[in-house]
Image: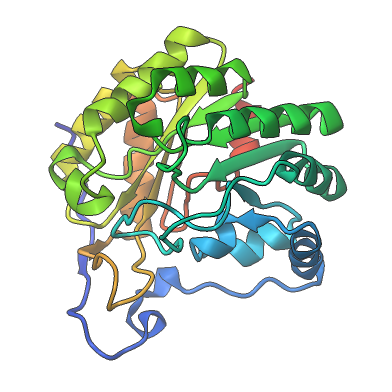
Amino acid sequence: MTALPHLPVIEAPERDSLSRESRLPRWLKRNVPKGNANHFTARLLDELQLETVCDSARCPNRMECYSQKTATFMVLGNTCTRACSFCSVPRGQPEQPADDEPRRLAAAAERLGLRHVVITSVTRDDLADGGAEHFYQCVSAVRERTGATVEVLTPDFIHNKSALARVVQAAPEVFNHNTETVPRLYRRVRGPHSDYRWTMELLRRVKQLNPAIKTKSGLMLGVGETTEELFDVLADLLEQGCDFLTLGQYLQPDVQRYLPVARYLPPEEFAFLGQAAKKMGFQQVASGPFVRSSYHAREMAEVSK
């Protein structure tokens, strides 16, 4: 196992009444981008009644991405049927999918001038296909209207192989499904419906169904995983043919309701892990405290061409 260099270890503090911002290490403090482009993006999304994971998941990169006129579109509503312990997306009983959402999403992509469109969704265990047909329609609508490349970031479709195949039929350039954490912590982090083995099988099946699609997965670090466990997961991902990898710091959305942070990894450790992952065989790796599943997704996809 590759040994880590000597790095500072920043343990997360005990829960207290302090705000999250006051407890963060210095490298997790961000400046607010200047300019009005972020307002343009926010107004457009509001006009077209579209959801983004940037807002719903309280992404720390929201202002940066909006200021660059980009966003990760979240389809199938803003209410998830799962209750993952790390995610701030509202959970409950969702509404029926909106038939015109693919059209509205494609219009937003066109008006933002996007060359690479990232589409994700809440988990919809209430739908027979988990929302697979809706993903297909969204990818098709974006392609027809913009010609942009498309990346999907999907839920697990509850082991539904035909639903997975339907999304693959849309032939997105990148198929992303997050691993999130190591097997030992899977149920604690992702809930009772999660299955590490199916996560690996899902990524393997995408490659089997369409080898031209780039597969991608991501993990959030600092939830209690060990370095050895992390490298074991990376080896598993490579065994499934996974091309792209993202590694980022888990940040607790709320100190009362969500999984606590076990450790804050310094930027030097993220840099080391990213270099190690590249040496292991991943084509593209994004590793850093603020890296999220779709952070700089276009750059990652374009470099791999």
**Residue 112 screen position, x and y as percent:** 82, 50
**In the rendered view, how is the structure colored?**
rainbow
Q: Looking at the image, which is closer to me, 269 or 57?
A: 57
In the image, taking residue 230 as reference, residue 69 lies left or right, namely right
Q: Residue at x 70, y 61 (%)?
A: 66
In the image, taking residue 14 as reference, residue 48 lies left or right, namely right
Q: Residue at x 61, y 45 (%)?
A: 97
**Residue 119 screen position, x and y as percent:** 61, 40
Q: Quadrant of the N terminus?
A: top left
* Residue 211 visible: yes
Q: Looking at the image, which is closer to me, 154 or 159?
A: 159
Q: Is residue 36 above or below residue 204?
A: below
Q: Is residue 302 above or below residue 258?
A: above
**Residue 136 screen position, x and y as percent:** 63, 27
In the image, taking residue 2 as reference, residue 46 lies left or right, namely right
Q: Residue at x 74, y 73 (%)?
A: 34
Q: Quadrant of the C terminus?
A: top right
* Residue 61 visible: no
| Residue that extends furthest to the bottom in the rendered view of this protein | 17
Q: Residue at x 32, y 44 (%)?
A: 180
Total residue callouts: 0
